[in-house]
Image (cartoon, rainbow, N blue to C red):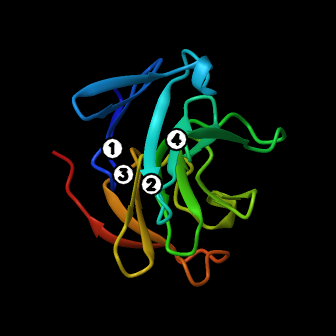
Amino acid sequence: IRVFFEDSQNRLWIGGLGALHCYVSGKLKHFGVADGFPASVAIGAIAEDASGAIWIGTGTGDLWRYQNNQFTCFHTPAEWSSCRFAALQADANGGCWAVTLGNGLLRFQNGRFTSFRTQEGLPYDNITQLLDDGNGNLLQSSYADSTLNASYHYDDPDSVVSCGLANFPAN
């Protein structure tokens, strides 16, 4: 098991190295090809947006949406190197943000991906965690050091606002 996520309907989503499951009302549902979801795909992250859609980021770099009992796949652009999703966060403006192992921070909104990497001002391209601070800021962290960084504000997501917030001593 790689990730647990409880959604607003109290369903427990479980993602692992080769499967996606949902535990609801005492029953475990496995999602596979018959449901429109690929078999044997690693799940790296799960989130929910304000409309109740479930977002699933995979180790193969595909972003999936589960809405109205249907899966839809969104592929990152072919010219990008393979993305491994590590965490997802839906924002208040209808976007879905993803941090990746190697491809920085991604935003999916209105059917398209935007990539933010070290070239755009991020401190690292290997990002492991993502959190909405409740004030429209995305907090992200990396394996590279113990600094917590605020990278983007929802109202102006096209500009990097990267700043170290705290440096935690490594133990």
Residues marked 2 and 1 touching at CB (< 8 Å)? yes
The numbered dot on residue 81 is none
Q: Residues within 10 Å of mark 3 (few under 14, many from 20)?
A: few
Identify the image quadrant of the N terminus: top left
Residue appearing at x 44%, y 44% in the figure: 46
The numbered dot on residue 56 is 4
Earlier in the chain: of badge 3 and badge 1, it is 1
Residues marked 3 and 4 touching at CB (< 8 Å)? no
Residue appearing at x 45%, y 41% in the figure: 45
Rounded to the nearest angstrom, the CA distance separating label 4 from label 1 is 10 Å
Residues marked 4 and 1 touching at CB (< 8 Å)? no
Rounded to the nearest angstrom, the CA distance separating label 4 from label 2 is 9 Å
Residue appearing at x 55%, y 30% in the figure: 59
- The image shows residue 117, relative to residue 81, as above or below, that is below
Choose top left, top right, bottom left or bottom right for residue 159: bottom right
Earlier in the chain: of badge 3 and badge 4, it is 4
Earlier in the chain: of badge 4 and badge 1, it is 1
Q: Which residue is mark 3?
A: 145
Front tag of 3 and 1: 1
Q: Residues within 10 Å of mark 2 (few under 14, many from 20)?
A: many
Q: Which residue is mark 2?
A: 48
Q: Nearer the viewer, residue 92 or 100?
A: 92
Rounded to the nearest angstrom, the CA distance separating label 3 from label 1 is 26 Å
- The image shows residue 1, relative to residue 168, as above or below, that is above
Coordinates of residue 13 in the picture (x, y in percent): 36, 37
Front tag of 3 and 4: 4
